[in-house]
Image (tube, coloured by chain):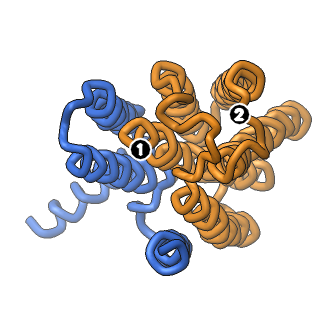
Chain colours: A orange, B blue
Amino acid sequence: MSATHTEGALPHEPEKATLEGRNKVLGFWLFLGGEAVLFGTLFATFLALRNQTNEGPTASELFQLPMTAITTLILLVSSLTSVFAVQAMHRHKVGALRGWLAITVLLGLAFLCLEIYEFAEYVHAEKFGMTTSAFSSAFYTLVGFHGAHVAFGVVWISILIGQLFKKGLTVVTAPKIYVSAIYWHFIDVVWVFIFTVVYLLGKVG
Amino acid sequence: MTTEHQANRGIVKHSERHEGPQKHIIVFIFSIILTAIAFAAVMAGGVNAAFTVLLLLVMAILQVLVQMGYWMHLKDRGHLIPIIFMIGGFFVAGTAIVTALYWVWW
């Protein structure tokens, strides 16, 4: 019912209602272009060094695909819940918006727990540390950087849930939520390349 | 006829503004299927390695394009500049990967 909005009511897409909000989204896309370059260089390093195992464990000895499948599914579902959060925002349903954001955060935390467990397993059981080989350094840098992005997103979205409690859904808070959703999808997009290039290609050899 | 047609288009646009979750669930299922194909191809093994690598890359790129189009709204109107930013980012990223693999390492 966007045509019948009364004065002062929240528009259908509150994240695009102000110039400041639109600029925030546009500026964030420029940042994501830079993020693509950052991850591109880490992928380049990993691809160049992935067979330099220095007599340590190789990719096909190390990786457990069922584990990777579970983390992939968790991140994919969290991307979907983040879409639902933005749809709830467009319907001005603040309770549903907070709920979907909370589920997204919980799934992000589950992903992080599994990743930490995986890394701990590699370091202790497989003797595959940061300095074991060029492959191990490249692996931990690339996958760890992605994990750090997930951790940052978890903290960021948690703070936004707090802001929603304090300030509600306004033309100021809406762009923040929209931008965090774009960020979360980007993390999922990077993970698609990680499970393909690092884990699956590692198994192929 | 023309005005009626335009009026209909207006209604369609309006209903699109409050889009349901169906489209995104379809993208989700599509992503799951592409992921399952990639994992199955590797877990089954025995297939030609070069073909598997090609298949994996195609599955990944397809999934990324669909997710960026629908979930990150890049296929919606008014996203030309974000698309240019992302193409620029991916171009530099791709250059870094090709350079590391073919010019620096070998």
Which tag, 2 or 1, sits closer to the chain's start?
2
- x and y, in percent, of residue B97 in the image: 50, 69
The residue shown at (22%, 55%) is B8
Disc nearest the viewer among 2 and 1: 2
In the rendered image, is residue B82 in sight? no
The amino acid beneath tag 1 is Leu
Whole-percent x, y for residue A192 in the image:
47, 44
Residue most toward the left? Answer: B1
Left or right for A173, reference B17:
right
Left or right: where B90 falls relative to A31: left
**Residue A55 showing in the rendered view:** yes
User: How many residues crowd around disc 2 within 10 Å: few (fewer than 14), some, or many (20 or more)?
Assistant: many
Percent of width and height locating residue A4: 53, 50
Please tell me which residue is depicted at 63% across the width and 60% down the height of the picture: A42
A168 lies left or right of A74: right
Q: Nearer the viewer, residue A63 or A104?
A: A63
Indicate the quadrant containing the C terminus of chain A: top left, top right, bottom left or bottom right. top left
Which chain letter goes with mark 2? A
Q: Residue at 25% across / 45% down in the picture?
A: B49
Residue A151 or A124: which is nearer the viewer? Answer: A124
Residue A26 x/y as whole percent: 64, 70
Q: Residues within 10 Å of mark 1 (few under 14, many from 20)?
A: many
Q: Which picture quadrant has residue A201? A: top left
- Residue to which mark 1 is pinned: A201
Q: Residue furthest front?
A: A55
Q: Which residue is mark 2?
A: A128
Hey, which quadrant is residue A144 in on the image? top right
Alpha carbon separation for disc pair 2 and 1: 19 Å
Which residue lies at the image location 66% right of the left edge and 56% below the top edge? A15
Q: Amino acid at mark 2?
A: Phe
